[in-house]
Structure formats: C-alpha cells, structure tokens
Image: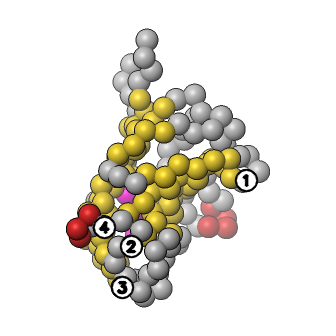
Amino acid sequence: MEKASWTIFWNEYSSDTYLYGSEIEFVARNEVHFKNDLMPPGTVIKQWYSLTNYQAQRIEPSLPIIDGESRYRIKVNVETPDNQGCLIRLVFLDRYEREAGDFTVRGKEAEFSCPLKTYSYKMQLINAGMKEFTYHSVTIEEIEKQK
C-alpha cells in the first residue's frame, strides 16, 4: 500500500493573508517572498482550509481530508533569515466549527494525529518574530501503520 502525500502551496489570492504593510512577491508556484517589518509576533500570516464555504469565502479547499484513525508527518519548507521563528499551527474543528484540538509545528518536521471528532481543520502560518521569509511548501503525508 502506497502512503498518501499532499503538498500545500501558497496560491495567489489574498484572502486570509495578512496584508497590512506586507510586501508579497509570487515568484513561482513554490516560491513566495514575504516581508513585513511592522508585523507583531503571534500574527497569523496565512491560512489554508480543508473545508470552505465557496459562496462566502470565494476560495476552494487547499488542504487534504485527514482522519483521526491515521498518523501524519508534516514537513515545513520555509526559509527564514538566521532560521528565525516560523510556526505552523493546525486547528482541528468539529462539525459545528468549534475547536476540537490543535497542534503546533515549531521545527521543519513533526508527526501528529487529529482528534477523532475532527470534521475539518485549518492550517495557519504564524509569525514568531521574523520580518521576512520565503514560503516554498508544506507537505502532509500519511505514516504507514505498523503491522
């Protein structure tokens, strides 16, 4: 059985992106330069969703459907000067869009599983003290179950 793997890129639409004072340059599908000297730490820079309301948000889901039965590995490919802070936070939501749990990635790679009552989730790129970075991609892959 082949394990599933998904790559998440930063698409060009600016919805759910922190734009105030930001300079964003879309060089290629897997290369987005972001700079903002005035953005406070803890700010959510960009969000991606596994489930959207197209009528309201005008965006399509960009995250894979995952379940609470499996374990996953997330790999973050973001370049920051001096390896300054960049956080990826996964927020798991139940069917009523209430938070059912969360998981924060502080490095380049981590393993996680989502709560069983997860109905959808969102991924947030959070500023942890950086002024600029280059976003390439985030990869989520299913970890094969041990037999």
Mark in front: 3 vs 1? 3
Task: Give the percent coordinates (x, y) of residue 24.
Answer: 35, 78
Say which residue appears at 23% left-offset and 70% top-offset: 81
Residue 37 covered by magenta stretch: no
- Which residue is under mark 2? 129
Amino acid on which disc 1 is placed? Arg
The secondary element bearing badge 3 is classed as loop
Q: As rendered, which of 70 and 8 lies closer to the eye? A: 70
Q: How many C-alpha atoms fall within 10 Å of the one at disc 3: few (<14), some, or many (≥20)?
A: few
Q: Vertical placement of 133 versus 113: above or below? A: below
Mark in front: 1 vs 2? 2
Q: Vertical placement of 113 versus 134: above or below? A: above
Disc with the residue nearer the chain's start (3 vs 2): 3
The secondary element bearing badge 1 is classed as loop
- Which residue is under mark 1? 98
User: What numbered label is drawn on residue 84?
Assistant: 4
Say which residue appears at 63% left-offset and 47% top-offset: 101
Amino acid on which disc 4 is placed? Gln
The secondary element bearing badge 4 is classed as loop
Residue 6 at least partly seen = no
Q: Which residues are magenta?
A: 9-13
Q: How many C-alpha atoms fall within 10 Å of the one at disc 2: few (<14), some, or many (≥20)?
A: some
Say which residue appears at 48% left-offset and 32% top-offset: 71
